[in-house]
Amino acid sequence: MSSRFLNPRIAIFALLILCGTSPNASAQKQRIPPGGHVAVVADERLAALRSVPEPSARLLRRLSRGRFVSIRGSSRSRDGLVFYHVVVTRRTSGWLQSEAVIASWRPGDDERLLRLIDGADEFDRVARARVFLDAFPRSSLRPQVLLIYGDAAAEAAAKLSREAERRLDRRELPAGGAPEFSYYLNYSGLDRYNRQGVTFTFDRAAKKFHYQGAAWREIMQRYPNSPEAAEARKRLEALANVKMR
């Protein structure tokens, strides 16, 4: 492995700090694989763990986005692809295409992840932006990603409002005994966004979800002189007007 890789223990501790959590809290959510140099899966389309460093090799398992891996070595396939030998758990290891993961110690990975975010659909933009915000707290690209994250969440709110209206049959709601708005707030379509840190408010009169705006507020607080701050201000003003109706 290249000498630019961090000491394994330092890498693990650094990634825990980057993810904004303590070692104990992280252990409850996901165990950090032992040893090696820690990275996180960002492009699940390439995250096929294989028996040898070849794209056609036997598939061991497919890794999900946000999964931590520990890099132990690297090899180049016959096609010129770089594969990392990674440990996923104490009992699971294999070969993973290098482009599947990002790491704060690898130069240019924040730019590469931003390109992935730009090319994704609405939920993938939220999920990949969340990975970026956890892994690159000091990147100069962070205001851009916060704006993308907030805008994708707002787009999701409109989509979820339409879906919930279709799926929650008003004729059946009173029979359940609970207030109508509580069915909306417990709508299962919200779950995956909640796991990405997205919080929605609910307009009971209009029966619409709205993104709460945390990413836009962070831009205003931490990056007030950035080009994204002007856009964030517009979105927060629009959100305030919605709440006033």
Image (tube, rainbow, N blue to C red):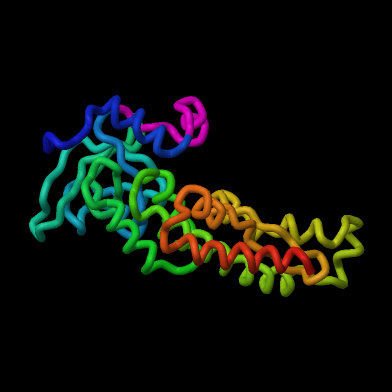
Observer able to see residue 192: no
Q: Is residue 75 left or right of residue 60?
A: left
Q: Is residue 60 left or right of residue 27?
A: left
The one of 218 and 223 positioned closer to us in this rendering:
223
Above or below, 210 against 72 in this view is: below
Above or below, 67 against 110 in this view is: above
Q: Position of residue 194 (x, y in %)?
A: 60, 51
The one of 23 and 62 positioned closer to us in this rendering:
23
Observer able to see residue 75: yes
The one of 115 and 194 positioned closer to us in this rendering:
115
Above or below, 106 against 176 in this view is: above
Q: Is residue 169 left or right of residue 238?
A: right
Q: How many marks?
A: 0
Location of the N terminus by quadrant is top left
Please give the name of the residue rendered at 77% of the width and 65% of the height, measured from the top-left corner. Answer: 244
Please give the name of the residue rendered at 79% of the width and 69% of the height, measured from the top-left corner. Answer: 245
Q: Position of residue 21 (x, y in %)?
A: 48, 33
The one of 241 and 59 positioned closer to us in this rendering:
241
Q: Position of residue 86 (x, y in %)?
A: 26, 39
Residue lying farthest to the front in this orientation: 225
Answer with the quarter of the image where residue 177 lies.
Answer: bottom right
Q: Is residue 62 left or right of residue 241?
A: left
Above or below, 168 against 217 in this view is: below
Please give the name of the residue rendered at 53% of the width and 60% of the height, measured from the top-left corner. Answer: 150
232 within the magenta span: no
Please give the name of the residue rendered at 12% of the width and 38% of the height, measured from the top-left corner. Answer: 2
Q: What's drawn in magenta, residue-wise?
A: 21-34
Q: Position of residue 26 (x, y in %)?
A: 47, 32
